[in-house]
Amino acid sequence: MVEVRLLGPVEIWADGRPVEIGPPQRRHTLAALAVDAGRPVTIDALAVRVWDEPPPAAARILQVHLTHLRRLLAEAVGTPPTRLLRRSSGYVLDIAPERVDANRFADHVRRARGADPSTALTLLRTARGCWRAEPLGGLKGGWVERCRHAYGALYLDATVAWGLAELRTGNPLAVLGPLVELATDHPLTEPLADVVIRAYAAAGRPADALAYYAEFRRRLADELGTDPSAALQALHQAMLRGEPVATRETADVAAGVPVTVVVPAQLPADVPGFAGRAATLRILDNLLTETAMAVAVVSGTAGVGKTALAVHWSHTVRSRFPDGQIFLSLRGFDPTGQVVAPQEALRSLLDALGVAPERVPAGLDAQAALYRSVVAGRRILLVLDNARDAEQVRPLLPGTATVVVVVTSRTQLTGLLTDGASTVPLGVLSWVEAEELLTNRLGPGVLAQRHALDQVIAACARLPLALSIAVARTRQTNFPLTALAAELSQVGDRLTALEVGDPAGDLRAVLSWSYAALSEPAARLFRLLGLTVGPDFDVPALTSLAGLPERELRTPLRELTRASLVTEYDLGRYSQHDLLREYAAELARRDDAQDVHRSATVRLLDHYTHTAYEADRLLNPAREAIVLPLGEPAAGVSPEPLKDHGAALAWYGAHRPVLEAALRQAAAVGLDRLAWQLVWSLDTYAARKGHLHDQAMAWQTAIECADRLGELPARAYGHGGLARADLRLGRYAEADDNLNRALELFTTMGDRNGQARTEKHLAYLWGQRKQPAIALGHARQALALFAGTDDRTGQAEALNAIGWYHALLGEFEHTLSYCRQALELFEADADLFGATSAWDSLGYAHHHLGRHTEAIDCYQHGLTLARTLDHDLFVADLLVHLGESHRAAGRPAEARTAWTEAEQLLTALDDPSAAGVQESLRQLDD
């Protein structure tokens, strides 16, 4: 038998003996193929894996290595033979995946998840036996490091799970050595520290357990400025009281490889004409030589160029960070006051690193722990822009020396400096640097206008933002620099908040001068921009904000863009420096009446709410009517027209951060009805895309708004909405509480539809609790309540639910009866989503009755509808079921086709059930 080994030096073994492969580059090529054993790898993908920057002759060099590998494998002894095949889509290492040690290791770890304790321990022991040394030993490069990190993370989780399993069987001495050794490489990983402490305690060494806790706590404080989690602190207190230490029952074991390693590349574009800052750039360069976690705080006044410096430096060193570069705005001084909370920031970071939303835990401590585990050992550059205070930043610090962090803030963040961060104070440009900035952007000809050049530099106080606006004005007007200098010298009104010690160089002078040059329509639009929410805005939103038709908006918007008062960063999408938005808001307060502000705010939020509502109708046309009807849009509001399901999905995806900010703003300014309606309109999209934490927070806001409104229907529906999010998050106790609150309110109002929907969700709750008999009772109650209403969709959903719970009870003929009734109603009302679910239930029943042809037909019907809905998860589920029926019917080729597509979809969705499909595919080869 031939085996490929990756968990250590890359080797081939045949008939129990190692086979000489050749030079390191050939072993590198073999590894690049083996990680995708049985799957084609293109020549381009091979080149990128072997070289970070492939040479011109990469393809020819690879062909030589592939020829040698093909001959070597052909000569190796093994049954079945291992071959290197050429396919139209690339090269395939034709070997059973389990004959690659990394796959075998991951498979054992995956199977240990759901196994009984004895079997799990055996599997984890076997998995650890696969691990010989550092994966891909002797190889170098960015791809190799990413693979090592992925395998290392899996090994870490597996070792923690193994340690706990051994402790449960009373073997503390067997695990202490390996765990303590691993902890030296992962000194800030809390799950590992937890099991080490338990092992010391179980081995009768409580003093060592307490000493290890004290050292771990000190490391967290020194390197992260944080304390251990509440759970670990509780363990420590229990030991101090002399209480016996219980063995933890579970550990988070990572899913099997192949692991999708996301390499974020989020840096904004480099700053054109960047000038000066040589000494500061050298300070940042010193971060690259730090042996501990490197954090630099770039601080200074607004407009001094903190973000420009951080972005420019990041571009110069990004090749040193092969595992990615992340840029995150914390909006610490956002003019709307909507600072990014640490939990929101952590979710954004985990999203950038490829962690699926549904896998993100709810609590801040758990999110931070997951984040630190994901980045451990990876070479990543993290830029945290516009931080408000140290408390906002601390949970985002990764706790590993391989991640370099640059924080920008208007404040010094003294709390981080006392924790060991480097300070990089940023002042205004030197005179020479300011001159360099102007000549870089306006050309060397300005040097001939020396007096005017000096006047502009003095008036702008050598502040980069002020100089940049002056450059834009000069380009816009084509006036000589002397005219600009004369105007600037006459301006006496300065932006008080940004004084730099010289009244003649205050930034408000530059901004007010630029504003004064605008036409009246452009000036009015600029003032209104102080009311926008979220990180950006688009033309449809601006038309509603301004209450103007788009044709009247285009000209003033172009004028603002040319004056650099807004930036069109993508086609039709605009952003604005927060200082400019602050200034716009200040002007609006000064020049416009309060009722003008209020009307514009209502128009903007009304725009987002009505557009979101129409998008929801496209995604879920069979959904029940909203209990707080929207009515007509406010005067001047033009909701964005969306033509179909795909357009609705795209709109939600592009506007999600803005919609979340709009919701917060609506609630903050007392527009409770609009806020509640917006939450309702975001619900379908959030549920389908797995944004469950955001969905739960939104419904909590909706409940608070409903309480203030005194609207019982809105309160009841709000508790139901929060319960649905809780259900998908696995928070069953909270879901139970919210569902019962909703049921009580609906009963008080005599709302049969509301009671029926709540009973249906209670059925789902008990189904998730593995109590199908109780679930069936709630589903029957839902149907009885729906029967007295005209809610055909509800009746159909209740019938389908009854059928499904009969299936879970093994009563498949009942399933067929109820689900056929449901299907008739769904199809009569053109409810594609409901019909898809009914076809799936019918297929399930036929399959378990041994009627595989009928099951296949049902799944095919459902699959057609799911593809129409563009619902990837539903498509994948149906493909999995279809494959099972094909296999049962003796059609392995058709099963492989269905499962292959399902596996691709589930892997792209980062869904844990992908591993089960991969196992099904492997079993087809047995």
Image (cartoon, grey):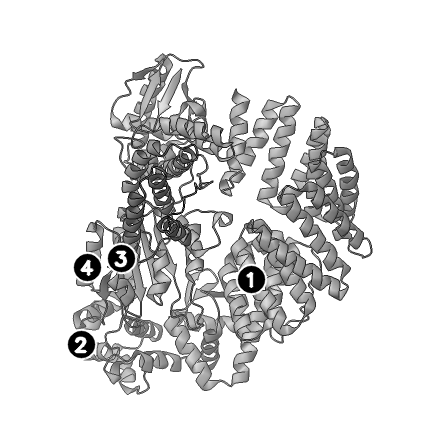
Q: CA distance from mark 1 to mark 3?
A: 34 Å
Q: CA distance from mark 1 to mark 4?
A: 43 Å
The image shows residue 42 at horizontal and vertical percentages of: 40, 32
The image shows residue 511 at horizontal and vertical percentages of: 35, 78
Residue type, mark 1 in image = Ala
Give the residue at x 80% y 51%: 784
Mark 3 or mark 2: name the one nearer the start of the chain. 3
> Dot 3 corresponds to which residue?
295
Instruction: Identify the element where label 3 is drawn.
Output: strand
Quarter occupied by residue 472: bottom left
Q: Nearer the viewer, mark 3 or mark 4?
A: 3
Q: CA distance from mark 3 to mark 2?
A: 41 Å
Instruction: Identify the element where label 1 is drawn.
Output: helix
Any mark on residue 283, and which?
4
> Dot 1 corresponds to which residue?
698
Quarter occupied by residue 695: bottom right
Instruction: Identify the element where label 2 is drawn.
Output: helix
The answer to the question of whether label 3 and label 2 lie on touching residues, with beta carbons closer than 8 A, is no
Residue 92 position (above or below residue 554): above
Residue type, mark 2 in image = Arg
Residue type, mark 4 in image = Ile
Q: Nearer the viewer, mark 3 or mark 2?
A: 3
* Left or right of 794 in this view: 266: left
The image shows residue 190 at horizontal and vertical percentages of: 36, 47
Mark 3 or mark 4: name the one nearer the start of the chain. 4
Any mark on residue 450, and which?
2
The image shows residue 276 at horizontal and vertical percentages of: 20, 64
